[in-house]
Amino acid sequence: MTRFLANLKSSHSSSVFNHSHKIIAFPYSSQTTQPFQPKTFFRSNTKDTTLVPHLCNQKRFDEAIHILCQQNRLKEALQILHQIDKPSAPVYSTLIQSCIKSRLLQQGKRVHQHIKLSGFVPVSSALAAAAAVPCLRTGKEIHGYIMRTGLDSDEVVWSALSDMYGKCGSIEEARHIFDKMVDRDIVTWTAMIDRYFQDGRRKEGFDLFADLLRSGIRPNEFTFSGVLNACANQTSEELGKKVHGYMTRVGFDPFSFAASALVHMYSKCGNMVSAERVFKETPQADLFSWTSLIAGYAQNGQPDEAIRYFELLVKSGTQPDHITFVGVLSACAHAGLVDKGLDYFHSIKEQYGLTHTADHYACIIDLLARSGQFDEAENIISKMSMKPDKFLWASLLGGCRIHGNLKLAQRAAEALFEIEPENPATYVTLANIYATAGMWSEVAKIRKTMDDRGVVKKPGLSWIAIKRDVHVFLVGDDSHPKSKEINEFLGKLSKRMKEEGFVPDTNFVLHDVEDEQKEQNLSYHSEKLAVAFGIISTPEGTPIKWKSARNYHTPQYTVTSVKLELHEQYVL
C-alpha cells in the first residue's frame, strides 16, 4: 500500500504511513513495510517531523535533514536534530553550511551548542568539504562564519582552516593561519609541509620540515613519506640521506610506508644499492616498494635486474598493478626484449584481468619501434581501445628515426602536429630524419613551416645539481666558471673514445655542414657539458645524475648512457 502511494508520488503516502504507525503500537520494522523514504515524506511539505526519529535509521536521518536544508526549511531540520540521540558529523556539516548560506547566525549558534554537547566539530567537516571540491569562496564564507560566531579559539578549527586554504591553492593564507596557531600538532605540521611540496615550492617545504625538527615535535610516517617523496621528485639524494639518518636515529616502523618511500627515493635518485638494501631490510615489502625498485632498475640502465625483481614479485604472490607493468615494459624496451615484452603486455589483460592503459601502449610501441618491428606496432595501434596519445606517437617517431622509416615517421609526425602543433620536438625530429636521408629540401620545408606557425626551437638545456647548487648548460656554452676544465676533459675523453673505436653518429645533426663540424657540435652538446662537469666535480665512483630539456624525441647520442671507463663513474 505504502509502496503504491509512493510510486504515485501522492502526498497521502506519508500520512498513511504515519497514521498506520500511530495506530499500531510497535516499532517500525523493514519486514512489515517499506523503509521510510524522506524524499516522498517531504515532497508534500508536511510540517509533521515528530515521528521521523522513530521511523528512520541513521542514513535516513542524514537524508531527511539534507532534503529539508535544500528546501530552506532549517527550522524543521533543527527540530529533527534535537530529536536525534547521536547525530552524525555530516548532519552537523549540512546544517552549518545551510546557516552560512542563509546568514542565520543565531540558528548556527544553536547548532554549534548542540555540537559541543555531542562532541563533534562539524565546522571542520564543512571546511573539509570546501577543500575537497575545492571551493575557496565557500571556504572563505565558512571562515567568516567562524570569526563572527567566536569559534576561532578552537585549534582544531584553525587546523582545518589552514588545510582548506592550502587545498584551495591559497598557500600564503594557509601559512598565515598556520603561523598564528599556538598548539600545532604533527598532523598540522605535516599538512602544511605537504602543501608546499604539492605546490612545487620545495625549498619552503624543506625549510618548514627543518623548523619542525627544531620544534621538538617528532615527525610521523606521513611526514617522512612526504619529505622523502619530495627528495625523490627533485632527485635530492643528499637531503634524502639526511632524512634517512634522522629516521634511523629516532627509530621508525619498518612495516610503515615510510620504508617504501625510502626505496622510492633511492630508486629515483639512481642509488639502486641503497634502494635494494632498504627493500631487503623491510620485513614485508608492499607493492609500492616492489614497483619502485623495478622502475628504478629500468630507469637506471639495469633492465635485467628490473625483470628479475618482477619475476620475484610474481612468485611472492603479490598482484602487480598497471604501474608495475609500466616499469617492467620499460625494462624490456631498454633491453630490446621484444618477445618477453609482448608476453608481459598480453598478460596484463589475459592473466591479471587489468585494463591496458595509455602508458602500457606507449611502452610496448617504444619497444617495438626501437627494435624496428613496425608491422607489429601498427597492428597493436589498430586494435587499441583508446585513441593513441602524444607519448605513443612520439615513441613511434623516435623508432622511425633510429631505423629510417620515413613513411611511418611522416604519419606519426602528422598525428603529433594535430595533438600539439606548438611542440618543436616533432619538427626537429622529422627534420633530422629528412637530414639523415639527405633530403635537405624537406628540411627547408620543415623550417619554413615552423616559421609560419611561430614554432621556435628552444635551446637544449641540461642541468646538474652539485652540493645543492644547480648548474645549467647550453649547447656550446662557455660561460660556466669551469668551462676551460670541462672542455679539456671532453677533449681527452673524445680522444680516448676514438682510440677505442667509438665513432660519433653525425647523422642526426640538423645542420647541413661538414662531418668534422657536426662532430664538434655533438662534442659540446649541453648534456655532455653537464655530465663532464659532474665528473670533474665529484669523487671518483659517484653516480652522475642530470636532467635535460630536449628538442627531440630520442637520445642524440649514446655515450652518456653507458659506463664511462675513463673515470669509473655511472651516468644516470
Image: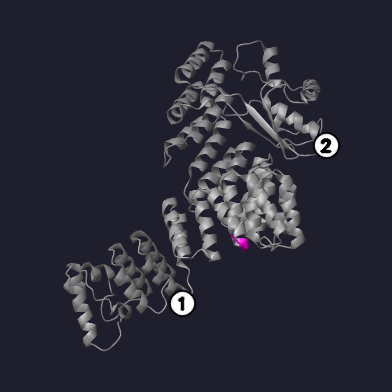
Residue beneath the point at 71% across and 27% down: 528
Task: Give the residue type that dot 2 points to.
Answer: Glu
Which of the 4 image quarters holds residue 99? bottom left
Give the amino acid type for the residue marked by disc 1 in the picture: Leu
Residue furthest to the bottom in view is 25
**Residue 29 quadrant:** bottom left
Q: Between disc 2 and disc 1, whose residue precedes? A: 1
Q: Quadrant of the C terminus?
A: top right
Res 540 label = 2
Q: Nearer the viewer, residue 72 or 87?
A: 72
The percent position of residue 123, horizontal first and vertical second, equals 46, 64
Q: Secondary structure at mark 2?
A: loop
Image side of residue 72 versus residue 59, left or right = left
Residue 270 position (above or below residue 288): above
Q: Is residue 408 above or below residue 107?
A: above
The disc placed on residue 117 is 1
Which residue is drawn at the image coordinates 44% and 54% (left, top)? Answer: 140
SS for dot 1: helix
Left or right: residue 572 versus residue 15 is right
